[in-house]
Image (cartoon, grey):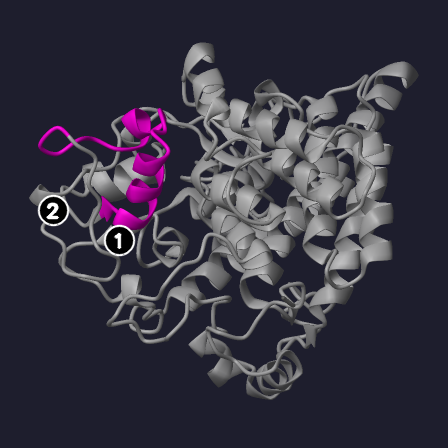
Amino acid sequence: MKKILLMIVVFTGIFSCTDDITGLNQNTKDPTVVPAVYLFTNAQKNVVDQMVSTSVNFNVFRLFTQQWTETTYTDESNYDVGTRTIPDNHWAVLYRDVLKDLKESRTVLATEVYVGSPQEIADQEIVRSNKGHVIDIMSAYSYSVLVDTFGDVPYTEALDIVGFPNPKYDDAETIYKDLITKLTAASAALDSGYDSFGPADLIYGGDVAKWKLFANSLRLKMAINMDDVDHAYATAQVLAAVSDGVILSNSNNAALAYLGTQPNANPVFVDVVASGRDDFVPTSTIIEKMNGLNDPRRAVFFTQVGGIYEGGIPGASNNYDNFSHIGDLLLEPTFEGLIMDNTEVEFLLAEAVERGITVGGTAESHYNAAITASMSYWGVSGGDVATYLAQPSVAYATATGTWKQKIGEQAYIALYNRALESWTSFRRLDFPVLIAPAGADEDFVPTRLTYPAREETLNATNLEAASTAIGGNTLLTKIFWDVN
């Protein structure tokens, strides 16, 4: 199992006797420079933790999409994100704990001095280059999460507190296109014949070929997101990404393997089991949908209550004992954290076909492949997969509705436990139809997070300009690609 490196090494200095006491005021216990590898590892774990977390202080996207709901305290299920300053925390993790560390990792990486024979040094230089491109890919992923959550965000002036203490907010579409350009360059430049971060890479163990697949899959997703805004651009980017190679097997999923004990356990285990609290139950929204389809994944996603699967009412004060609970597998401390998988890629390819982009195959073949990949991931037998796909309510030719409904309904189920991507799919396709809880702060399901309250104090002028540019700093303002 991959080792999670969380503790920064304390460097040992070697001192000789001297009468010079000028150095006595120096702090010899804390490192002045942290190795690039540790900064990368720390950033990597922080971003996956944030995407996997179900803490109502950090990640409420499962509640937005009504796959989970709360029991005693229902503020977040009713779309109150201000009481616990959730936008502030999400923002801070991504900028401070992820992107800042990635930037510093790249800076330190550039200063590393290699020794050995000319060939050994040349090989190390290639590995250095690979590391830099992997950092770029992780940075692009993190910025894409910020854009998909908030819209316009600081980008060109971000992470430079000295030069730009109050960074401007960049146009979200412009950021997206720049990220796609950087992902394209990084994918092309990676040398698969060499390693990158090795075991310090908690996702791919330094496997450069898999990092290429991840970068290209992220390009595919971002391009599909943009299709309703700029079809020509999206088409070109989708075709290029698919040509360069995307994740077409669960064996290439981007996932971080957690350990059995805190602080390195899966955040869902920490939030739900280790906390000793009974704060969440799955909702009637997803359970009734899966009940209607006799979906075999129910046995993994949920427990039964009274011999049936029954979900709580979104936003209501649900009695924990009266409803199904979160399935045992998801609550294992070692259960991996996914940030990109074959299931998502196949649904995106099905969308691409329906959007008129010739990626190969049919919408039906990619739709079936997506469902099959999901079923396989969750341990469903091949026979049960075939039975499920054969149902008229599931089969692509006979399922109800437009292609957006067919893909959107199945993606909603398959992206269970991938909260942000489930929310993104819902926003892009407008399916499934979700009704805001009766007591919600808003009449509709949120389409973005509001900007952090802290920004209103520290960066008010730029925040105001960004709010005006996107059409208002509300939960119902849409991200630039969400135009339908």
Nearest the eye: 68 or 385:
385
Q: Is residue 392 above or below residue 159?
A: above
The residue identified by callout 2 is: 320
| Crowd band around label 1 with a 10 angstrom C-alpha radius: few (<14), some (14–19), many (20+) | many
The image position of residue 27, as x and y in percent, is 48, 51
- Left or right position of 173 against 340: right
The part of the image, by quadrant, that contains residue 136 is: top right
Q: Amino acid at mark 2?
A: Tyr
- Toward the right, the furthest residue is 118
- Left or right position of 14 against 318: right
Q: Amino acid at mark 1?
A: Thr
The residue identified by callout 1 is: 69
The image position of residue 23, as x and y in percent, is 55, 52
- Left or right position of 113 against 458: right
Q: Is residue 272 above or below residue 372?
A: below
Can residue 6 be seen from the camera position used here? Answer: yes
Q: Is residue 217 above or below residue 375?
A: below
